[in-house]
Image (cartoon, rainbow, N blue to C red):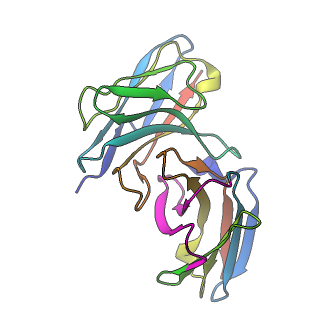
Amino acid sequence: GENVGLHLPTLSVQEGDNSIINCAYSNSASDYFIWYKQESGKGPQFIIDIRSNMDKRQGQRVTVLLNKTVKHLSLQIAATQPGDSAVYFCAETHSGTYKYIFGTGTRLKVLA
Amino acid sequence: NAGVTQTPKFQVLKTGQSMTLQCAQDMNHEYMSWYRQDPGMGLRLIHYSVGAGITDQGEVPNGYNVSRSTTEDFPLRLLSAAPSQTSVYFCASSARELSYGYTFGSGTRLTVV
């Protein structure tokens, strides 16, 4: 909803630049990770996922990097566009359970 | 494809009132969950279900009940609304396989006065 962005860390980038959003996950046993995008007034929407047997996965304009050693996940958005403005969440889970743990989110602001 | 449908989109309740938030999915997903979203706190799991007739508590279940009589529907009941339950509520569903994670509904914004 509209209040999701309150109190969240904010990343401001110029239109056309690349964006990098970071996430520290909590459970070393987690083996599946997802990035979600949430626009104002909408529910989270799947962007890209990665399994723990991979370090990198690429989609259209997005790349997810996974560093299991330091339990860190990042989302890279190439050539950031105004439509990329949203709150981005990472989520983790273990294949033995379908319960996801969500990060608190980062708000991305794209400056024209 | 409707996906996950939540009703109502907005609701104002008085303290002590009860109500049911509706959630329906048409993807034949086994897993369904309810989350609440508060500013700066991300998504917190209230209750979840791994299939019809099976439900369990998440991390913040107090004050809420659920049931899963069919695969499609997973209503969330607020027993006696409190101002602390003012939040945005999301229903989500997922297939058993770990792919594409959850599909979320568009949310219900609940205000308890």
**Which of the two residues, B33 or B95, is positioned nearer the viewer here?**
B95
**Which of the two residues, B96 or B86, is positioned nearer the viewer here?**
B96
**Which of the two residues, A71 or A40, is positioned nearer the viewer here?**
A71
Residue at image coords 36%, 55%: B97
Q: Position of residue B36 (x, y in %)?
A: 55, 37
Total numbered circles: 0
Left or right side of B44 for B77: left
Q: Position of residue B29 (x, y in %)?
A: 29, 47
Give yes or no for residue B103 being in the magenta stretch: no
Left or right side of A53 for A9: right
**Which of the two residues, B5 or A22, is positioned nearer the viewer here?**
A22
Left or right side of A80 for B23: left
Residue bounds of the magenta highlight: A28-56
Looking at the image, is A98 positioned above or below residue A91?
A: above
Q: Quadrant of the N terminus of chain B?
A: bottom left
Q: Quadrant of residue A30?
A: bottom right
Residue at image coords 76%, 60%: A9
Q: Position of residue A108 (x, y in %)?
A: 66, 68
Q: Quadrant of the C terminus of chain B?
A: top right
Q: Position of residue B46 (x, y in %)?
A: 53, 31
Residue at image coords 67%, 88%: A17
Q: Quadrant of residue B111?
A: top right
